[in-house]
């Protein structure tokens, strides 16, 4: 039986916990509510750069000591940056949760690095950027965001650009760190066999140096662009993304979008997996993802295939989208995918890291707790009528965007720019 509690420290730091008494481990996250979309134009990549640098040294530990701090206990320590936030997280045994929290607080409150470490890590990040360019399954999503959210901060690459990273200075990193790693811009979430009151007491000690956060972070919603872009790269196969705008985190119909995404490409029973892989054998990997932000979102369909099959794969994807838009879905399909989503949520709820992450995201987006039972209740409320409303009002094939990346794809530029995802031109 899990139990949720929330406290707000005098300096605004929020502490949220979900006690899971049966667990042998505790997962703790320190969330900093700043990401790539909040950066200045000349500082693109600074959120990710800062995340790297905190692991290079603090006032108490050097890089090796940070690495050994939890690994020596059999635990884990890691971090990641997104377009909207940065998360530092630890996983430790129940008896070691204070060490897990203390290390996270050290990272978030006490960064201290030398000029040498700064320059060395800059080289590492430049290598990471170069490596991402050679990882088509990842870089194609950056190309998608750049294209559909053109000239908007959400279109920026999380890693930054080589130029902005090369020009980054140590002072700018520290100024950014001191500005955003403060007060109400921080959330501490924890899940497992942990006492909320004990955690709050420790947080009061460890985060007392954080000042109240008064900066007004103003975000503007992006305008979707139905971009059609090709990127010619020397690689083994072609990579395809077809995307449509979808709901945001805050949207009333976000669970309908979740169902549609599962139906399209959420697993082996999905329509696209069956149509592209099972019936045609045109791709080993074909799936869809629902990418949601606080004020926007998209469903992106990925497929990797031989260059000679690109047109056929895109045509099959378009046909499935048209069929779904026109015929909607059957009650039996809705029931199956609601059951599928319910099962995924319930199985995920046994994982303390999943629950820690859910706690942090829900506090960040909604400012409240959303239990697994509550989410399942909302999914159970989905009806054919509400799904059809989503398909009629959100699922806009006129706004279909497409990215093609691979060898000799420039010959497809005019074709994809004029391709009709609605099927209207083809019926004439």
Image: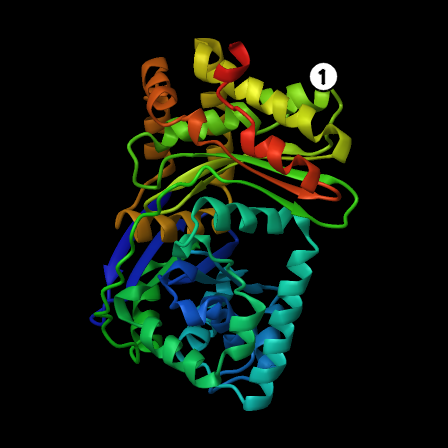
Q: Nearer the viewer, residue 73 or 10?
A: 10
Query: Which residue is at a point 71% across and 44% down the rendered structure image?
Result: 406
Q: Is residue 33 left or right of residue 116?
A: left
Question: Considering only vertical position in the picture, is 386 above or below 131?
Answer: above
Residue pushed farthest right?
A: 236
Q: Is residue 213 left or right of residue 272?
A: left
Q: Is residue 12 above or below residue 273?
A: below
Q: Position of residue 129 (x, y in %)?
A: 62, 64
210 relative position to 91: left or right: left
- Using the rendered image of the protein, determine whether residue 386 is visible from the camera's viewpoint: yes
Residue linked to disc 1: 279
Helix, strand, or loop for circle 1?
A: loop
User: Whole-percent x and y of residue 362?
Assistant: 34, 47
Instruction: Tell me the quarter of the picture where residue 217 sits.
Output: bottom left
Q: Nearer the viewer, residue 375 or 164?
A: 164
Q: Residue furthest bottom?
A: 115
Percent x, y for residue 170?
48, 84
Decide which of 273, 71 is in the foreground and name it: 273
Question: Which residue is pictured at 60% across the width and 28% down the height?
Answer: 267
Quadrant where the image shows the N terminus = top left
In this rendering, the answer to whether 133 lies above or below 53 is: above
Question: Which residue is rendered at x = 37% and y = 50% of the image?
Answer: 361
Position in image of residue 216 (x %, y %): 22, 65
């Amino acid at each position: 039986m899990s139990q949720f509690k929330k406290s707000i420290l005098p300096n605004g730091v929020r502490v949220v916990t979900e006690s899971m008494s049966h667990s042998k481990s505790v997962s703790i996250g320190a969330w900093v509510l700043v990401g790539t979309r909040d950066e200045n134009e000349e500082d693109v990549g600074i959120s990710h750069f800062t995340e790297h640098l905190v692991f290079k040294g603090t006032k108490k530990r050097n890089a090796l000591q940070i690495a050994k701090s939890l690994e020596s206990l059999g635990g884990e320590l890691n971090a990641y940056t997104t377009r909207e936030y940065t998360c530092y997280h630890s996983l430790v045994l129940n008896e070691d949760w204070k060490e897990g929290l203390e290390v996270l607080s050290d990272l978030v409150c006490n960064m201290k690095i030398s000029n040498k470490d700064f320059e060395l890590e800059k080289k590492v990040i430049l290598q990471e950027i170069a490596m991402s360019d050679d990882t088509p399954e990842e870089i194609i999503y950056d190309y998608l965001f750049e294209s559909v959210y053109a000239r908007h901060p959400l279109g920026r690459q999380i890693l930054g650009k080589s130029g902005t990273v090369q020009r980054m200075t140590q002072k700018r990193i520290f100024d950014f760190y001191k500005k955003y790693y403060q007060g109400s811009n921080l959330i501490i979430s924890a899940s497992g066999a942990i006492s909320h009151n004990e955690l709050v007491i420790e947080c009061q000690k460890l985060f007392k140096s954080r000042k109240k956060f008064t900066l007004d972070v103003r975000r503007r919603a992006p305008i979707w662009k139905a971009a059609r872009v090709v990127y010619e790269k020397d690689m083994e196969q072609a990579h395809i993304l077809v995307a449509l705008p979808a709901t945001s985190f805050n949207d009333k119909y976000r669970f309908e979008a979740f169902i549609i995404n599962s139906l399209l490409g959420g697993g082996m029973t999905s329509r696209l997996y069956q149509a592209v892989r099972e019936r045609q054998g045109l791709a080993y990997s074909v799936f869809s993802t629902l990418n949601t932000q606080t004020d926007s979102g998209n469903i992106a369909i990925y497929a990797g295939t031989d260059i000679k099959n690109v047109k056929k794969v895109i045509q099959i994807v378009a046909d499935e989208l048209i069929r779904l838009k026109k015929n909607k879905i059957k009650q039996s399909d809705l029931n199956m995918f609601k059951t599928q989503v319910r099962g995924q949520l319930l199985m995920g709820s046994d994982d303390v890291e999943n629950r820690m992450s859910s706690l942090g995201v829900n506090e960040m987006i909604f400012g409240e707790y959303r239990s697994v039972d509550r989410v399942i209740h909302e999914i159970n409320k989905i009806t054919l009528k509400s799904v059809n409303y989503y398909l009629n009002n959100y699922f806009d094939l006129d706004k279909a965007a497409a990215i093609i990346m691979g060898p000799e794809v420039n010959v497809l530029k005019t074709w994809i720019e004029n391709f009709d995802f609605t099927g209207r031109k083809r019926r004439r």
